[in-house]
Amino acid sequence: MVETALPSTRVGFWSVALPVLVFFCLCRSAPAKQNANTASPPANVAQTLEQARELLPPVLVRYKGGEIRREEVWPRIKKRVQRHLATGNPATPGLLNFLLGQVMPLMLDQRLLLPKAKAAGFLPDLTGAEQNAREIEKQQGTEKFAGMLREKGLTREEFVLEMAVRTAIKEWVERAFVDKETATDAQVRKFYTGNPTEVTRPELMRVSHILVAVESNAPGQQKAAARKKIEGLREELKAGVPFADLARRASDGRTAAKGGDVGYLARGQGRMGAAFDDAAFALKPGQISGVVETSRGLHLIKCEKHWDAVKPPITDIKERIARRVKEENARKTFSVFMKEIYADADLKFFYR
């Protein structure tokens, strides 16, 4: 049955929920590193994982009340160092410094902000985080989920704990900063008139597809077999076989179980690739495309529902805009707060 209600998931301003500081506290760059009163590690190179690990000092960062040690961080960058070494290139202090820069700001922010959140009564909810982890595993599949954990260098328990900590800090930031801000009518009108792209709901489609998976660099014989298969499926559709039934029976990929349902596509989003989107947005509700080739394989696409782009009246989205304005105001306040947090932490960095 085709839905008639507008989708709740959109891009940009039209997300399910407007970003709460875009979890600003967990996505910034760390302050400039200060050299500790210790000798710098030798500017050496490493040909093995163990050698690369030894290029890092035992303590990477020390702050008032604690420290972040090499053994805590190494699992999070180990896979990427391993891939680098597999190319035949040595691991250098510069490479390690770059990789540490991908994970250290998050870890440091969590260490410094979690006590603030706890003091305000926002405690990590391990039960809720475990439920979220199960939902992620269900969506990704057990194998892909396990691969994600390996890539992050986390056990399942560590992943759950990190989600719980992030959520506790996020909720505290919302309460302590965003909720205390105000948005005047003048600010709301200024945002509405000055950000037409953000307040306009983009052109949307609900689509389904049938996929015959084949890699773009596959041998010609394999490509020909895939082409023959999808042309055969196209003939079945012409003969009256319901699209969803055929997708469940013959489509490759996870969408097959849902009758080929891809969900909502927004014009310009590019979630399925440019070729897919171009073909999809050329369709009218009920129409089925010809064979469309993408990096994933060959597709037949059906347009289930279409919505034109629309800029709603300000009265319809006033509350959303006000929330966005409050978040922007809170971002400035929070930035000043974080500078004070870092200054008080008396940070010392021991890696290059």
Image (cartoon, rainbow, N blue to C red):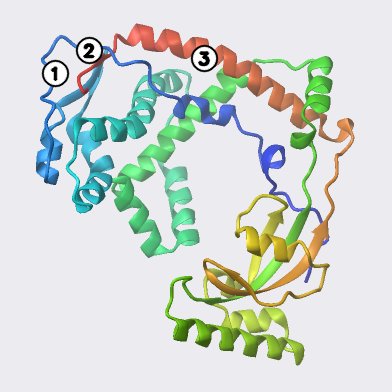
Residue name at image x 60 percent, y 71 percent: 293
Comparing 159 with 216, the one in front is 216
Q: Secondary structure at mark 1?
A: loop
Residue name at image x 44 percent, y 58 percent: 137
- Which amino acid type corresponds to the residue marked 2 in the rendered image? Asn
**Does label 1 or label 3 sit earlier along the sequence?**
1
- Marks 2 and 1: CB-CB under 8 Å? yes
- Marks 1 and 3: CB-CB under 8 Å? no
Residue wearing tag 1: 40
Residue name at image x 52 percent, y 86 percent: 224
- Which amino acid type corresponds to the residue marked 3 in the rendered image? Ser
Residue wearing tag 3: 335
Q: Would residue 104 appear left or right of 308 to someone viewing this image?
A: left
- Label 3 neighbour load within 10 Å: few <14, some 14-19, many 20+: some
Residue wearing tag 2: 35
Q: Would residue 152 appear left or right of 88 to someone viewing this image?
A: right
